[in-house]
Amino acid sequence: MRFTINLATRTYLDHRLLNRLAFCVIAVLVAVLGWNISRIASNMGEQSRLNAEITAIQARSGTKPDGISETASVHQKTSIRFYNEIIERKSTNWLSLLDLLENVTPEGISLSALTPVKKLEELKLEGRARSFKVVQLYLEKLESSKYFSNILLLSHQNMVAGENERGVQFTISCKVVN
């Protein structure tokens, strides 16, 4: 028995089903587009309302309250600025910074001063070493550390502490990487 099928005349795609599926996908996409447009409009309205509130609050904070003299207002702002600076200085974790410095400082280096510059973004290290080779080693260790960058040797000079004791006094600037 021999079966013959003519494949050229048979319809393999159900065009009705494809058209329905395409219509459903388009309808869902149009609904999502409408929802996104309404969200954007709502967010823009909320943003303009918040901007108006921010402007009103800034306008109120810039003027002195009623019943307070100008000198009292200036004195209050000065004391607020002073206390904010104290809080900012106390927010620095000095113990972790000193621990980082201790880990990269080789033997033969003694640091005599640690000065923060520009709100602790930059440090100025002053110290003494037995020789300039030790200072070079210190610079290399600072550069290889991931916690310090922009290391600069600002100055160095030979010093004599006695008949047999010699050393190098140096100043290094570096940036602390958080």
Image (tube, rainbow, N blue to C red):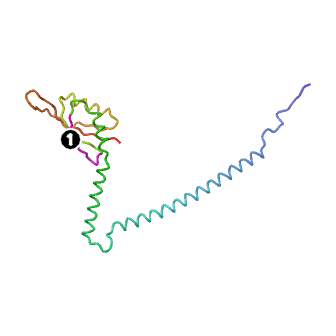
115 inside magenta stretch: yes
Q: Residue furthest front?
A: 95
Which quadrant of the structure image shows residue 170? top left
The part of the image, by quadrant, that contains residue 38 is bottom right
* Left or right of residue 143: residue 2: right
* Picture coordinates of residue 144, whole percent (x, y): 32, 32
Question: Which of 10/161 is in front?
Answer: 161
For the residue labelled by badge 1, is the local secondary structure a helix, a strand or a loop?
A: strand
Quadrant (top left, top right, bottom left, bottom right) of the C terminus: top left
| Relative height, residue 82 to residue 164 (above, below) | below
Residue 105: quadrant of the picture: top left
Task: In the rendered view, tell whether residue 112 sits above or below residue 23.
Answer: above
In the shown orientation, is residue 128 left or right of residue 145?
A: left
Q: Which residue is mark 1?
A: 113
Image spot of residue 91 (x, y percent): 32, 49
Q: Quadrant of the N terminus?
A: top right
Residue type at numbered disc 1 = Ala
Question: In the rendered view, does 41 fall on the left or right side of 165?
Answer: right
**What number of labels is visible?**
1
Give yes or no for residue 35 being in the magenta stretch: no
Q: Main secondary structure of the magenta part?
A: strand
**Which residues lie in the magenta part?**
110-120
| Residue shown at 28% from the left, 57% from the top | 83
Q: Residues within 10 Å of mark 1 (few under 14, many from 20)?
A: few
Farthest residue, direction top: 1
Q: With respect to residue 80, does 163 lie above or below?
A: above
